[in-house]
Each structure stands twice: as C-alpha cells, then as structure tokens.
Amino acid sequence: MTTNTVSAPAPRTPIQEFWHYFSSNKGAVAGLAFIVLICFMAVFADIVAPHSPSAQARDALLLPPAWLDGGSWSYLLGTDDVGRDIFSRLIYGARLSLSVGAFAVTISLVVGILLGLVAGYFKGVVDICIMRLVDIMLAMPSLLLAIAIVAILGPSIFNAALAISLVSLPNYVRLTRAATMTEMSRDYVTSSRVLGASPLRLMFVCILPNCLAPLIVQATLGFSSAILDMAALGFLGLGAQPPTPEWGSMLADALQFVQRAWWVVTFPGLMILITVLAFNLMGDGLRDALDPKLKQ
Amino acid sequence: MSLLQLENLSVTFGNFRAVDNISYKLEEGEVLGIVGESGSGKSVSSLSVMGLIDFPGKVGANQLTFAGQDLQAMPEKQRRKLTGSDIAMIFQDPMTSLNPCFSVGYQIIEALKTHQGGSKKALKQRAIELLTQVGIPAPESRLNNYPHQLSGGMSQRVMIAMAIACNPRLLIADEPTTALDVTIQAQIIDLLIELQRKKKMGLVLITHDLALVAEVAHRVIVMYAGQIVESGPAAEVFRTPKHPYTQALLASLPESSSGKARLEALPGVVPGQYDRPQGCLLSPRCPYAQEQCHKVEPDNQGPLDRQVKCHTPLDSEGRPAA
Amino acid sequence: MFQFIFRRLSLVIPTFIGITLLTFTLIHMIPGDPIEVMAGERGVSPERHAELSAQLGLDKPLYEQYFHYVVGIAQGDLGQSLVTREPVMNEFLTLFPATVELAICAAIFAILVGLPAGIFAAVKRGTVLDHSVMTLSLTGYSMPIFWWALLLMLVFSVTLGWTPVSGRIDVVYWIDNTTGFMLIDSWLSGEEGAFKSAVSHLILPSIVLGTIPMAVIARMTRSSMLEVLSEDYIRTARAKGIAPWRVIVIHALRNALIPVITVIGLQVGTLLSGAILTETVFAWPGIGKWLIESISRRDYPVVQGGILIVATIIIVVNLLVDIAYGVVNPRIRHNR
C-alpha cells in the first residue's frame, strides 16, 4: 500500500515522548535552562563569584550597578550599605536557597510518600487519623504555620527549612494517598497480592512507581514555594540571620535604603522572582508532559 | 427549490479533511438518512450546516443554501437567526447536552425567547405545550426540574422539545438514540418521525442503524472517510447496493447473516489522518479492488439522485462491473 | 439544604478541635522553660515566674491545662498579652477590621482583574492575548510579594509620589473609630480629603496582597472555562442560535464558576498569610503585623491566640464556600 506524504510518526520511547512534549513548551524549556544555570552558579559559587559574600569594601558603600554613573565593573550589580558585592551575595544566596529547597522538598517528599502510602494502603483508622491531621494543616496558611513553628523553635535557617518541609507535607500525603487508592483497586495489584507479595513490596514496587508523575510535578512546584517561603521568612527575620547572604534577608537589610539605592532592593527580589518563576514554568511543563490525560 | 442544498462541502482541521467534497440535497418534508462508521464525517458535515464548526476547523463549499438563502454569504447575526429557529439540531448524548446549571424550563424558554419573544406567561405556556407534545407527563412540574433529575430518554425528549420550539423547517438529529437504552430508542425515533410528519419538517437522521434508516428514511447517504460513497432512495440503496462499502455494511447486519456461523465484517479500519491511501479510500479494504482502484480516485457516477463513487459499481446481483 | 449544611458543619468540628490541640501544644514545644524563653533578655524574677506560671496554668497537669484552655476559648478568653496585659481577644478585635478592610479590597481587585482575564484568555485561546495573560499570571503567582510591595512603593510612592508610603490614613486626620473600617469611618467623619487619603493609602497594599489571588483566579478561570466550553451543552446552546456573548456569560460562566468559587474561597488563607507580609511592609496596623511583632516580642499568648483565630476564620470561610458551592451547583444541593 502506498501512502501519501503525511506518514504516521514512528513510535517513541517514553523518554523521547516525554521530551517531545516537554520541549514543545517554550516556557518550560526556558525555566529548565535558568535552573541549570543557577544550579551551576550555586555549585561553583567560589569560582564564579567575583568577591567573597562577606567581604566589605569600605571605600565602595552603596555603589550603583556597573552601567550607571559612579558604578564599577568589579561590582556588577553594585554594593550594599557595608560595601559587599551584591552580585556575589546573590550567587551565594542561590546556593543557600537551592539547598534549602532541596532539603525541604526531600524531607516532605519522603515523609509525605510514606504517610500517603500507609494511609492509602491500610485505610480505616490509620487513614482517618492521617487525613484529619492533613486537614488541620491545610486549614492554616502555610506561611502562618511556618512562622508559628519558627517562632517556637527559634529563628535559624535549619528551623526555617524544617518548618517549610513540614507545611508542604499535606500536598504530598494527599497526592500519594489518592494515587494509592486508585492503584489499589487495579487488577494488577490484586494479582500480585494473590501471588503473595508482601505489603512493603506492594507499596513500593507495585504502587509507588505508578504515582510518581504527579509527585514529580508537585516536587518541582514544592521547590518554588520552598524558595518563596524561605525568602519570606528571611524577610521577616525568622529565617537566615545576617550576615548570611540569603535573598529574603538581603531585602530586609535593604529596607532602609529603598529611597537612596534602588539596586539593593531590586536585584535580590528579581532573583527570587525569576527563580520561582523558572520552577513554576518547569512544573507546568512537566505536568503537561507527564499527564497522560492531556496527550492525544 | 430544495430546502437544503450542499455542493462540494469540505471541512478541514489543519491538514485533516474531516469532510471531503460532499454534495446532497434535501427537499421539504423529506427524511434523509446519513449512515457510516464512526469518524466518517457524518456529524461534522451537519455541524457545518449549523455553523458550529470552530476554529481551527474550516468550512468551504461551492454552495451551501437553506431554502434559497446562501448560508455562507450571510452575516453571522443573520445566520444565528436561522440556527435554532428554522434549522434545529439534537445531539447524541442528551445527558451531557443539557446545561446542568439551569432548569429544563429555563432552557426551553430561552430558545423561544431568543427567536420569538413574548410575555413570561405565554412563554411558559408554550414550554408546557412543547413538553406535552414530546410526551412528557406532568409537564408543569417538569419545568422546574434540573437535567440531572431526568433519565436519558426524558432528557432527549427535552432536547427534542427545545429543537422544535420554534417550528424548524429542518431538523438534524445526530445519532439521537445511540446513548439511550434499547427500549427507549424506538420510542424516541417514533416521536421524531411523528413530529416530522405532523410539522412537515425536513429531517436529517444521522445514525449507525441501517435497519432504522431503511424503515424511516426516504433517501439515504452512505459516508466513508469523509466522502459520500453512495446515495439514493433508501429502498433502492438497501435492495441493490452499488458500492462495495454499502454492500459490506448491509452484510454485517445480523439479519442478513442468519444461518451463517459468524457475522461478516470488512477487515481493517477507516483511514485516519496519517494512513489515507491513494486512489479510492476504500481500496485497501475492498474485496473487489483492482489495480486502478489503488491509483485513481473514482468519480461520482450516475444521476444526482442515485450516485455511487466507485470504478466498478455493483450490479443488481451484487457483483462488480467488469 | 439544612441537612447539607448540618453535614458540613459536623465535619468541621473535629478539625477545630485539632487546631485547639495544635495551638495548645505550640506553647509546650518551646524548648526549655517557656517562661524563661518568653522573658528573653528581659529576665524574670522568681515571683513573676510563679505568677506567670499560674496565669498560664503551667503548674497544672497537661490535661487540666488543655481543659482550661478549651473552656476559655468557649468563653472567648484567649489569655492575656504578656506585654500589654490586654486580653488577646480585645487586641485582636481592635486590629481585625484593618486586616479585613485590606483583604476585602485585595480580593475585589483580584476578582475584578483575574476573572475577566481568565475568561478572555479562554475565549481567545492560543492567541497573543491568551499567552500574555498566562505569562503575566504565572509571574504574579511566582511573586515574592514583600519585594513587589517594595518595588511598587519605590515607583509610585518614592519616585512618582502618587501614593503614600505607609499607614492607613494621613497623620493630619484624626478619625473616630466607629466601625474600624477606615474607608467608612473617614467617609462618616466628613473631614475634607480624609476619605481620599484613606483610599490612596489602600491602593498599593491591596494590589500587592491581591496579586497572587489574582493570578490563581485567572489561571483557574481560564482552565475551567476551557473545559466548560468544550462541553456538549455549550454546543446545544449555540445550536439554539443564542448570541456568543450570552453563551459565554450565561451558559459557560455559570458552570465554570463552580470550581472558581472554591478557589476564591481558598484564597482567604493566602490573603491572611499574605497580610502578614503586606502589613509589615506598609506598616498597616492589622493582625499580620500584630502577630509578627508578638513573635519578636516573644508574646506567646498572643501568638497562640492569633493563630487559633486566623485558623478558625479560614475554617469558617471554607465552610461558607462549601455551602455557596451547593447553592450554585444544583447537583450537590439535591443529592445530599
């Protein structure tokens, strides 16, 4: 049989297919590119950053960005009130924000998956207890809950990260539980149960891989909210303490110079915005690429 | 003057031709059956008559007229005046075709109000009349019901009431019984035919159900992969099909297979966007296909009221012409 | 309908009890001796220690403490501020209207902008308009609002001088506190320019606080509209020959709004936590600023009470949203 010029596309491997959908979303690719760039800067901060984040140039206080009058090319984005290079502090800040994000997402992902699996697998009283807890946590705005936790444990980066991972738990628990419940009713789970698979094997080998897609998306979005919450806590003085180069606390320090030196305020915020936006763009792209419902 | 006349109507979505140069005529008071497999362009062609094909779909035709009025040339607003009043349509799945947020009465009255207007009381009275006409018991109380409180058959009756609200001259019924229980199907069809006769409407009946078409339709169109492969008076087409596809469709009816071990079926599936064959679209599946069929697309043969799109139309014995 | 409301209500009670447990535990999670921690660098004398211990009930067994706590809550008693010695409830009630006023204005801004933006994007899907709405709303969603506040302040207050930097009303006005809502009070006062001043003080904080809800509403409206527009009943409506705007506004929007209303309801949480940041930047005397100040002053009864109240408000609003959901959606109203 001869066919016309339009021929059916060759079947692709799942990864190729994923990349096909993902790369057709320009925003998602831009987000990914920025995340790769910023990860690179964070890892090699010691080499990339022109200055130490805490080095104070006494002769260059509140220097404007390089392209303005009075700026210096050795301080690309200008200096703050004690003469520290803003560009370098932003790079070191990226290291901090990304590590906090990674820490918070890992903790909440692991604990959330465990709780969700247990709730969805055993159902009954266990399920009710876990879900009630989740409901209570959801009734409180995450930032408020994080603030409360940090207020009790005392302000520090570690406590802030812990609080952030705790408040993002409910999302993962709910996702995993819902996915587990659907998978549990599928025939393949019943058949491996009949074959004598242990509950642990069922949970982690049979069920978990099948609910990974929404979890990956949620984790990406979790990264962005972790960075945002961390910056908010830092801004309120409940996260990183000065002189740590953290984006949120850099903003808090700069508050009093709003009128005199716009760059001290503008760049850290822009950095937060772009990073969070990049993660959100990538999360959206991942959701579209991983969600089979949207594929034709 | 025919009620509805299409000439070379095509509907394309990007590269894909959902409807490929079809032409047909429908007279006042006539019942036209359109049959064909899923995806053969039956629904899309009638949606284009209604003007309901959305971007990115494109409709093009040499002629598309309703009672002498050129539907393509008239402004959007004027065309909307026809849709819903003179031309009405009912759809496949009545359960999803009614808006769940509004009561039955609201939705019927809306159709009346859009095209005819009148006082609130008169509109309500007319809605009750309509519900009575479509055989819904206790119509006054049904007006305040919401669609989720109705059964499938009831919903379809409401859809019909809505469609006939403004006394249309043409009613298009797109598989009106497919989503319903078998016992309800006959009732709905009876209702449609009864209304058609009483109101002398033209009726386009789109369906999978060949037996039904044979029973109620004056004329029939058989569609395959967006094209009309055969058309003619219903009785004639079913008695002596000229197209191998029509023959195969009829052979696949349980009635024609009595005494045989299994139902006959045409091998293969309707070609999609990527596997449209050259030549006759049926050629890969056609038991009579010859060299020529794989290369050259056949023309429509015969007079407009009895056409067949085949190089070797079947004779009265059901054998291909040499 | 009453049965429906009753069922919803009975689901809320365990959650509320859980929250009282949580806020109760909070004060016991303070590492070390809570009173020492609360006193901080101020230090505390042994007498005051005993007095505070008795006042907070820390000398009794846990279950008894919890019992007293709950009984107190039931009577509207949330304890006393350690700093001002005022009952927490009173402090809350004086500050709450300011936050409500801000949150309502922010919500109005978010709905007025987000809803039409989402509808237009859905109706014009795939166009430049759609893409710009989506890009802008994702940017809004990713916005660190404390920075956004600073930025707007920098542009509109510092550079252009169009809006005041902070507070609720210009210091030259002395407005009687009648309702607690500055817009209403300044209007009632009849003082020339007072109302205008109150409005101008509200604009930036409302935009800042409304930004994230606006983005969420726009995105939700768009996706919900897109889904509804592909439904069969939209085709039916169009087949009736109804004008396109009527199809969108009457037939599509009514259905599309159902999930959007839920999302708007969920924004109350976002608004209240956003208020903490917004009020801090704009020196807005509401409960957000109050909570943050209490934390830095280690005024734990206030923190405890404040969180309890905020969580309660959110539960109540969610309950109301649930009920509103039932009113809009006849399927739910009838089935339960």
Image: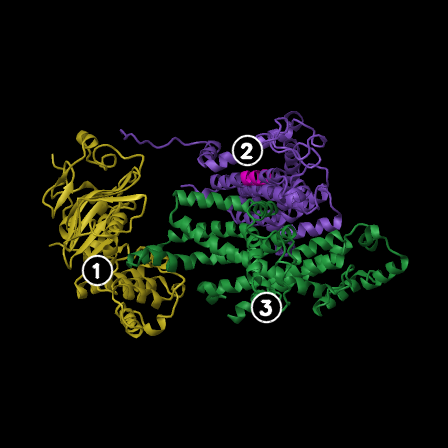
Circle 2 chain? A
Query: Residue beneath label 1, please?
Result: B86
Tint of chain C:
green
Q: How many marks?
A: 3
Seen from the viewer's position, the closer of residues C324 and B18 is C324
The quarter holding residue C75 reads bottom right
Q: CA distance from mark 2 to mark 3?
A: 54 Å
Tint of chain B:
yellow
Query: Residue beneath label 2, please?
Result: A34
Tint of chain A:
purple
* Element under disc 1: loop
The quarter holding residue C20 reads bottom right
Please check the rendered image and state whether residue A276 is part of the magenta-colored stretch, yes or no.
yes
Query: Residue beneath label 3, please?
Result: C189
What type is the residue that disc 3 sits on? Ser
Please check the rendered image and state whether residue B61 is part of the magenta-colored stretch, yes or no.
no
Q: Which residues are magenta?
A: A271-279
Seen from the viewer's position, the closer of residues C64 and C302 is C302
Circle 3 chain? C
In the rendered image, is residue B247 in sight?
Answer: no
Q: CA distance from mark 1 to mark 3?
A: 63 Å
Q: Position of residue A110 (x, y in %)?
A: 64, 42
